[in-house]
Amino acid sequence: MEIARVCLFFFVSLIVLAAIDGRKRTRSPRSQDALSFCSWLKDNQQKKCEAQPLLGLSARDGVELALKECGNIFKDRRWNCSGVTIADVFQRQRMLKADNRESSYLHAIASAGVTFQITKGCSQGNWDDCGCDSKPTGRGKKEGEASWEWGGCSENYRYGYEYSTKFMDPGKNADKTLSNHLVRHNNEAGRRVIKDNMGKTCKCHGVSGSCTVRVCWRTMPKMEIVASILRKKFDNAVRVKLNKNKTKLTRMPRPRRGRKRNTNNKRPPPASLVYAAVSPDFCRADKKYGVLGTVGRTCSKSSLGTDSCPMLCCGRGYNTVNRVSDVKCNCAFIWCCQVKCDLCKEEWIEHTCK
C-alpha cells in the first residue's frame, strides 16, 4: 500500500512539473521577443518597456494593428500607408517626421492602437496592474430602450489611455520643438477617439430568453471604426505653427476674401489632427519618406473618386491587361460529407498606373 502511494505521488509530481515546464516554454518565446523589442527602443521608451516587457510587446502589436487599418482606410488614395513600418513609428523616422497630414494620421492611429491593445489585455487578464473597469455600477436607462444593470467585464480604457500617453508621447523633458508639440497633440487626438466612442454591449438573462435582467458592460469601438473617424479628421486637419514662446500650437491664418481674421492666438481643437508642412503629391517614389509612388498601382477606369485612373496615376496614363483565373463554382453538398465544386474561368480587365 505504501509503495502504491509513493508511486502515485511520484506520478502526480511528474505531471505538475511537466505542466509548469510547458507553461514556461509557451511563455518564454514571447518574453524573449519582448526583451529583444525593448532593447531596440530608445531612451524613455526603452526604460518603460524594460520595466514591463510584455506590455511593451503588446504596444508593438497595437501599432501593427494600427498600420493594417491605416492601409485599409487609405487603399483608394495615392498615399495608401504602404512603406510605413513599425520601426518608423517607434523611431519616428521617414514619414513619421514629415510633420504633414499623413504623419499626423500615423501618430494618431498608432497611439490609438496602443491604447486599444493594452486595454484588451486588461480585459483578458493579461496584466497584474489592471483588469475590468469597476466604475460602471448600478442601473441605467435611456429613452426608447429597456433598463439595464451594469455588469460583466467593462473594458478599462483608462489604463490603456494612460499607458499610451506615457509610452508614445515625448517625455516632459523633451525639447519644445514644433514636431514634439505636433506628436503630443495628434497622439492625444487618436486616444480621444477611443475615449469618446466607448459603447456598451448587453446580454439578456431570464427563463426561456425572457430578458428578465439585462446586463451591460462598456466596450471600445473596433479599430476599423477608429481608423474611419480619424480619416475624417485627416480630411479636416488644421494647419498650425508654434507661438513665439514655444509653449503652444496656434492656427495658421487661412487666406480669405476681404478682411483677414486674426487667428494668431487661436488654438486648434484638442480632438483635431494638426500638421505644419504641406504634403507632396505622392506620385513618385521618395526614399527619404518611404513613399513608394503610384507606378504599378491598380486603378479604376470607371471611378470618379480618388481611386480613378486619372487621379491615381497622376496623369501618366495606365496599362490595360486581360486577366483570367480559375475559381470554384457550382458548388454542391454531397451526403455525407463532401462539397464538390466545378472550376470556372473568371475573366476581368485590370488597369495599372504607368
Image (spheres, grey):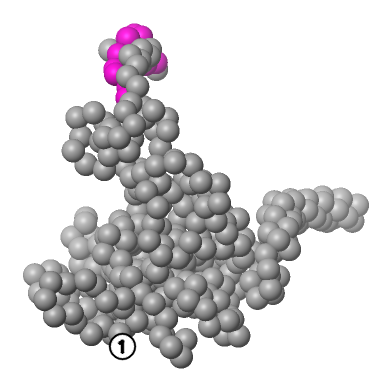
Question: Observer-nearest residue: 345 or 288?
Answer: 288
Q: Which residue is mark 1?
A: 265
Q: Residue at x 39, y 42 (%)?
A: 283
Q: Please identify the residue farthest to the front as the structure is shown.
A: 258
Question: Observer-nearest residue: 31 or 204?
Answer: 31
Answer whether residue 340 is visible to the viewer in this image: no
309 drawn magenta: no
Instruction: Name which quarter of the figure residue 258 lies in.
Output: bottom left
Q: Residue at x 18, y 38 (%)?
A: 304
The boundaries of the magenta stretch are 338-351
343 drawn magenta: yes
Q: Is residue 262 left or right of residue 295?
A: left
Q: Please identify the residue farthest to the bottom as the structure is shown.
A: 245
Looking at numbered disc 1 in the image, what kind of residue is underneath it? Answer: Asn
What x and y, as percent, mark residue 65? 47, 53
Judge whether 200 appears above or below 340 on screen.
below
Q: Is residue 167 left or right of residue 184?
A: right
Question: Observer-nearest residue: 164 or 76?
Answer: 76
Q: Residue at x 52, y 63 (%)?
A: 97
Answer whether residue 39 is visible to the viewer in this image: yes
Q: Residue at x 60, y 66 (%)?
A: 55
